[in-house]
Image (cartoon, grey):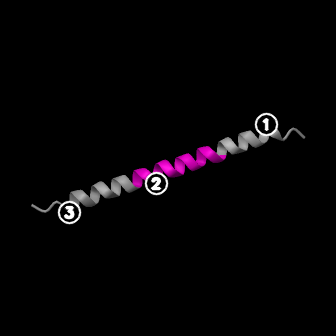
Amino acid sequence: MNHWPFIAAAYAITIAGTLGVVFASFASMRRAERQADSLTRRD
């Protein structure tokens, strides 16, 4: 029995999940930085 399709799918899911978390974290960080900037810029 060939296990490579399962191994490839597991790696694909792991990579996709990791990239999803990275992009979600980046978006959250950018949003928080904008909110922090708006608190310090009282023009």
For the point 84% across and 41% down, the residue is 41
Residue 8 drawn at (x, y percent):
27, 61
Cβ atoms under marks 3 and 1 closer than 8 Å:
no
Residue 22 in the figure: left or right of residue 16: right
By secondary structure, the bulk of the magenta-drawn segment is best described as helix
Residue at which label 3 appears: 4
Residue 34 in the figure: left or right of residue 25: right
Q: Quadrant of residue 29?
A: top right
Can you say whether 3 is above or below 25 in the image? below
- CA distance for labels 1 and 2: 30 Å
Task: Tell me which amino acid carries mark 3.
Answer: Trp
> Which residues make up the magenta segment?
16-30
Residue at which label 1 appears: 39
Which mark, by number, is residue 19?
A: 2
Residue 11 inside the magenta-drawn segment: no
Cβ atoms under marks 1 and 2 closer than 8 Å:
no
> From the image, which quarter does the N terminus lie in?
bottom left
> From the image, which quarter does the C terminus lie in?
top right
Q: Quadrant of residue 28?
A: top right
Residue 11 drawn at (x, y percent):
32, 57
For the point 28% across and 57% down, the residue is 9
Task: Tell me which amino acid carries mark 1.
Answer: Leu
Which structural element holds mark 1?
helix
Task: Tell me which amino acid carries mark 2.
Answer: Leu
Question: Total label count?
Answer: 3
Which structural element holds mark 2?
helix
Residue 34 drawn at (x, y percent):
72, 44
- CA distance for labels 2 and 3: 22 Å
Cβ atoms under marks 2 and 3 closer than 8 Å:
no
